[in-house]
Image: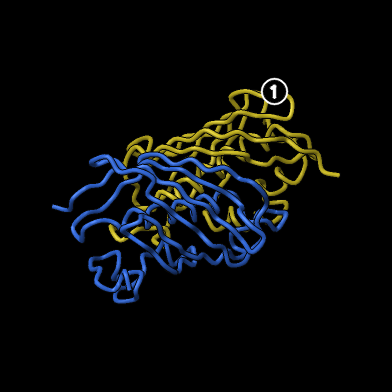
Chain colours: A blue, B yellow
Amino acid sequence: MRIQRRTGPFWDGVTGRAPMPPAAATLGFEFLDADPDAGWIEVAFAATDAFTNPMGEVLGGFLAAMLFDTVGPALLATLDPDEFQTTLEFKSSFLRPARPGRLIGHGRVVHRDGQLAFLDATLADVAGILATATATARVTRNP
Amino acid sequence: MRIQRRTGPFWDGVTGRAPMPPAAATLGFEFLDADPDAGWIEVAFAATDAFTNPMGEVLGGFLAAMLFDTVGPALLATLDPDEFQTTLEFKSSFLRPARPGRLIGHGRVVHRDGQLAFLDATLADVAGILATATATARVTRNP
């Protein structure tokens, strides 16, 4: 209910009114839920064999890409339709190895200070958290 | 010359004696050069349209994945054949937008202290550096 009235390119993409961005499609991105007023989002990813290292584990770089595509949407969900965001920096920690499968991302806007936003996220499988991230982003207005 | 005598799974992968890891193939990874004694590596990636955001720029998450797959090989290139590495944490900064195309990664082992290794990397297009990264990794010995 809380997202039905939302409009703009981000909501068009996650609700299927517009094609999903290519990078999100490559990561198997799926929008699950969000509360923009509270500043959180829940998304899912499909980690495939194409993302694995020689041990059959998902390369940390792809876990990072998924976390990146969790903090970004957490912020995008809170923006006006003519605003966009640029991630300035991004840090992730890898708690345990991940196998291919469905992974769940929880993203959060921790603090907003004018153009700057401080974000964090976790990425989990059914057994719990695999990796965490923090990021700093800048909100821009489309010309 | 300096890498011809190197053996092990990493060198088998980058020299074509063994299949490239799936994650590396997905990123269009290509080994260019390395000096394991000096602790640096040069690699290339093929950023495709599949990695782009709605503005046609390469999603920062995929730049992060490429930087991750630069710091890792920088360390792997210095290891014994029965050693492997786990990345503990990884931080990247995004200097300017990237378009699909060939991107060049320079990775470096900044410092090695027993099991721990401190790494950094840059990712560039023809116009210069797009993004930078630092990482901390732990070297493990295969059983």
Asked if residue B7 lies left or right of residue B66, the reply is right
On-image quarter of the C terminus of chain B: top right
Query: Which amino acid does the dot numbered 1 rest on?
Result: Asp
| Residue B83: % across, % down | 77, 38
Q: Residue B45's x, y, as percent?
A: 49, 48
Q: What x and y, as percent, mark residue B115?
A: 73, 30
**Residue A29, placed above or below residue B73:** below
Residue denoted by label 1: B113
Q: How many marks?
A: 1
Measured as percent of width and height from the top left, residue A78 is found at 29, 56
Q: Residue at x 55, y 53 (%)?
A: A63
Q: Which of the chains bears the disc numbered 1?
A: B
Q: Nearer the viewer, residue A40 or B60?
A: A40
A135 and B29: which one is in front? Answer: A135
Residue at 78% across, 35% down: B80
Q: Which element type, helix, strand or loop, lies under badge 1?
A: strand
Residue sticking out furthest to the left: A143
Farthest residue to the bottom: give it. Answer: A17
Q: Residues within 10 Å of mark 1 (few under 14, many from 20)?
A: few
The answer to which of A67 and B14 lies nearer the viewer is A67
| Left or right: residue A27 compared with residue B14 | left
**Residue drawn at (43%, 45%) of the image:** B103
Image quadrant for the N terminus of chain B?
top right
Residue A10 located left or right of residue A110 = left
Look at 55% across and 55% down and name the residue there: A123
Q: Say if B11 sits above or below B120 in the image.
A: below
The residue at the far right in this view is B143
